[in-house]
Image (spheres, rainbow, N blue to C red):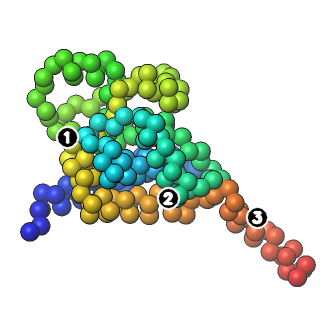
Amino acid sequence: MVNHGNMQTLKSYIKAFSALHTNVRKGHKAPHKAVLLLAIMELIEQGEITSPRIKLSDQLNEMFHTIWSKYIGTSAIFTPDIGKPFFHLQHETFWKLIDKTEAAAKIQMAAEPCPFESAIKKKQAFSGSYALKSLRESFAYAEIDPLLFKLLQQADHRAVLRTLLIDRYLSNQPTAVMPDINCLLLALPFLAVVA
């Protein structure tokens, strides 16, 4: 039996993942947020991430670089850096940064859980660098929407979102070894004379 609530929820995340706020350079969408989300999915699949709280761990950083190497390699435009997407995902509806002060307050009070849609989402300001050490000193973790976390625990939903991220943000990324098409077009008349 099809769970229509899950399908509606999946559709809302398909829409959100299809419209990630990304930097665009030389006509290419930055792959960083997609790579980070794929790393999180992989660690959920492996049973390493077991709650909606996403820590900026060494394990997450290693998985980020593994996925970057697999799909991007050496980019002609972008540098593999987990810090910026970890911070800037807060501009998406499903990601919230929890600073260390807020995390300590959450431990002390037993608040009623509330869905992300109805919670007031405060974007965190940040005056430090995007270096891992600086981010770890400022933020306890990021928190994804619990509904998204439930979806990502299911292999079929993970596969749909994984495919979407790869197709939309990681395919057709220019690598450092990829020749510049404009240079090739300019060289064609010369190559024809030499041949």
Q: Which mark is residue 152?
A: none
Q: Nearer the viewer, residue 117 or 105?
A: 105
Q: Is residue 4 above or below residue 132?
A: below
Q: Quadrant of the N terminus?
A: bottom left
7 vs 28, left or right, is: left
Q: Residue furthest right?
A: 194
Residue at x 21%, y 38% (from the top left corner):
116
Task: Tell me the amino acid under the disc marked 2.
Answer: Leu
Binning the other alpha carbons within 10 Å of mark 1 as few (below 14), some (14 to 19) or many (20 upward) gives: few
In terms of sequence position, does the residue under pointer 1 or pointer 2 come before the other?
Answer: 1
Q: Which residue is mark 1?
A: 117
In terms of sequence position, does the residue under pointer 3 or pointer 2 come before the other?
Answer: 2
140 vs 58, left or right, is: left
Which secondary structure lies at badge 1? loop
Q: Which mark is residue 170?
A: 2
Q: Position of residue 51 (x, y in %)?
A: 25, 40
Q: Which residue is mark 3?
A: 183
